Amino acid sequence: MIIDRLFNEVEKKGNVCVGLDTHLDYIPVNLKEKYQDIDEVLFEFNKEIIDKTHDLVPVYKLQIAYYEAYGIKGLLGYKKTIEYLRSIKKITIGDIKRGDISSTAEMYAKAHFEGEFEVDFITLNPYLGFDTLTPFLKYIESGEKGVFVLLRTSNPGAKDIQYLKVSPKDEYLYYIIGDKLNEIGAKYRGSCGYSSIGAVVGGTHVEEAKEIRNRYKNMFFLIPGYGHQGATGKDVSLYLNNGNGGIINSSRGIITAYKNYEDGNQRFADYARKAVLEMKEDIDSERGV
Ligand SMILES: O=C(O)c1cc(=O)[nH]c(=O)n1[C@@H]1O[C@H](COP(=O)(O)O)[C@@H](O)[C@H]1O
């Protein structure tokens, strides 16, 4: 199952997920001048970073908005990047955060679990209801695919809706979502004990971290918020379980790290590697393995 593959990769390479949220402003001018088309610029930047980091990390996440924003050429850059990652056997997450009625969700599943944009995992937004997850289940059942469903996000506005207290137990809304995902996910557990239906839990809020980890023992977490949004190795480690059970995403903190150095424009991928190594060290010193 895909979740066993991810678990095993985390055992070997640690928890860092490189976020390829590639804004054109993040790309050094010298690289932009070298290529004519946006798809080439996006891909070549991503490829250099991938080539310098793939031995250190288990997984890459691409937030699709950064590619959609540049139209068809942008999406071509997305496609080329995921194809490259898959060709070198890296696990890919398409951060698409979709959620819609089931007939439409069926097409989202087809769009991102098959064809030109095929990835191993996608992110989903459950706020239209749990029936929106159904079209993805046949792919998860095949063992090849997995999802990370938004549970409690990293942004300050997470408190506006996700923290509303709801009946019958007067608990935060995100626990209602978590309990249901846990129930649906039980059918899709791999031999590692985790389900291919995972959850997104922002590392920026730590108050309930232990409770969330203990309540959802079989749920694998995608944990964003490290670095630019303020979460530290100590914060995100609270969501891990014996050093596994979660991957920690950093996007700007890795791909724009070069901007802090005088020779960064020429060596952006070296500085991405350095940022990954520092992040790994920070997490490894806290995760208790
Ligand atoms: O689903 C996500 O990945 C996600 C959920 C969340 O709660 N917060 C969050 O920041 N993200 C994504 O994680 C990435 C964070 O980027 P950086 O803040 O640059 O590391 C972006 O791609 C966000 O869209």
Image (spheres, rainbow, N blue to C red):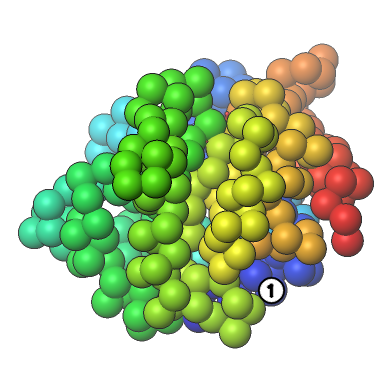
Residue assigned mark 1: 8
Q: Circle 1 — which element?
A: helix
Q: Residues within 10 Å of mark 1 (few under 14, many from 20)?
A: some
Which residue corresponds to the image point at 59% horizontal and 84% vertical from the top-left?
A: 191
Which residue corresponds to the image point at 86% horizontal and 46% vertical from the top-left?
A: 286
Quadrant housing the C terminus: bottom right
Place of residue 247 in the rendered image (x, y in percent of width and height, measured from the top left) = 64, 53
Amino acid on which disc 1 is placed: Asn
Q: Is residue 138 above or below residue 182?
A: below
Place of residue 250 in the rendered image (x, y in percent of width and height, measured from the top left) = 64, 37
Between residue 78 and residue 121, name the one nearer to us.
121
Place of residue 168 in the rendered image (x, y in percent of width and height, measured from the top left) = 32, 47
Which residue sits furthest left?
A: 103
Instruction: Specify whether tag 1 is near ligand 1 (CB below 8 Å).
Output: no
Between residue 112 and residue 233, name the one nearer to us.
233
Between residue 239 and residue 233, name the one nearer to us.
239
| Res. 87 visible in picture | no
Q: Is residue 109 above or below residue 31?
A: below
Which residue corresponds to the image point at 61% horizontal and 64% vertical from the top-left?
A: 217
